[in-house]
Image: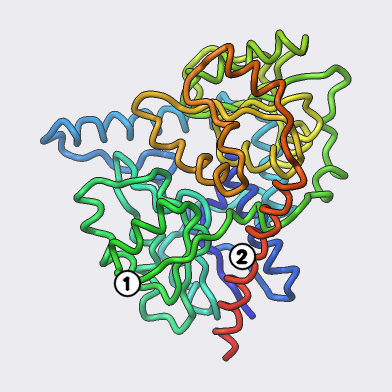
Amino acid sequence: MNVGILTFHFSDNYGAALQAYALRRWLLEQGHHASFIDYRPAHIEHGGRLCLPTSPARFKANLKVVYLALSAFWNEHFGNRGQKEKFARFREHFLGLPGTPAPPDNRASLAAAGSFDLIVAGSDQIWSPSQHFGFDPNYFLAFACAFRARKISYAASFGRDRVGDEQADQLPVLLRHFDAISVRESSGVALVEQATGQPAANVPDPTLLHSDYPEFTREANGAASEPYVFCYGLRSPDNIRETTGLVARALDCRVLSPHNPHRRWAEIGETVYPGPSEWVVLLKNARFVVTNSFHGTVFALLMRKPFIVAGLTGDKAPANARALNLLRAVGLESRFSPAFSARDTEALMNSDIPWSAVEQRLVALRQNGQGFLSAQLKAVAA
């Protein structure tokens, strides 16, 4: 079968690259042809267009556009060249994409998707409404309404546990194009059911469709000679900085932190610049993992690493829903630390993780996701 995947395949972001790879890998392993719909909207990483600042919300949206544009310019011209090349090689070797893609022709790419038998929207935060753009209808397959292909979402994420009233009002129209809907978080199930009146499947992120990633651990040379704490922080340094510092002092280890191009705070430990496959190896070989990232949590589980999820705080706290949903699903909600506490951090460091029970739950999640995808492929063939 010819399967098209619409997701954030183009982003120099570890989670985005790995989830895109994992979904395509599973489809290829089932004997199907799978490729990415090369939709690369400017608003995702480059900001997009400015709007008339007729309200405080629109003014803030313009600030976000300007910030993304400046950040993209800085990273393009002054960012770590070696890391950019590693992401390019990853897309070429593991995603089946050109290492140096041509400028996007989004209209042509979306039109070409009419040749697919099945179109999968997902995974990642493709349904997360941005401050400066809102929902992108194309990630809800609005462009494909006249295509013969079966249209589904797999583990799509809203990136939060609730959306605003205006956004909730848009969802019934946006979700009408799908033949089957699955989402990554249980909070997303509620949002879809409220919008459509129909049940949505709750399935795991594509990275959890696989129990291991030996193709990465063979390829990359990410092991360090000295023990280290792996700190993967996004969005904010609050909580994760203090938690990582305490863990590192207790273990007498240095700290390695993968580069985050949107970091606006002083580095935590030593900044390193791995590609996606090296990122997996660095996490796998770490003495301890501290993260506030969903995919940091995923790979800590898959690699059976002792870990703490240092929750985002303040106005960023709603984004914790992604990691919390996963931790609840595997019975490890206690590994989530909502705010820094030395006593709680020390207690988590000294508590064993029941890996056998966790693995049983991961197997159940994996089977659930594989079952959903298999049923959709059978529906196309019927």
Q: Is residue 196 above or below residue 251?
A: below
Coordinates of residue 275 in the picture (x, y in percent): 70, 37
Q: Would you say residue 162 is visible in this rendering?
A: yes
Neighbor class of circle 2 (other Cα within 10 Å; few <14, some 14-19, many 20+) is some
Specify whether residue 109 is in view: no
Residue at mark 1 to residue at mark 2: CA–CA distance: 24 Å
Residue 216, position as x, y percentages in the image: 80, 45
Q: Amino acid at mark 1?
A: Arg
Answer with left or right where residue 339 lies relative to residue 277.
left
State how the image is colored: rainbow
Q: Position of residue 180 (x, y in %)?
A: 45, 73
Q: Secondary structure at mark 2?
A: helix
Name above or below for residue 267 compared with residue 224: above
Left or right: residue 144 compared with residue 50: right
Reply above or below: 44 against 67.
Answer: below
Q: Nearer the viewer, residue 177 or 293?
A: 293
* Foreground residue among 246 and 87: 246
Label for residue 368? 2
Quadrant that contains the C terminus? bottom right
- Residue at 24 percent of width and 46 percent of height: 164
Provide the residue designation for mark 1. 176
Residue type beneath disc 2: Asn
Q: Which mark is residue 358?
A: none
In front here: 310 or 180? 310
Q: Quadrant of residue 346?
A: top right
Residue at 62% over, 66% down: 35
- Measuring from the top left, give residue 255's x and y in whole percent: 70, 16
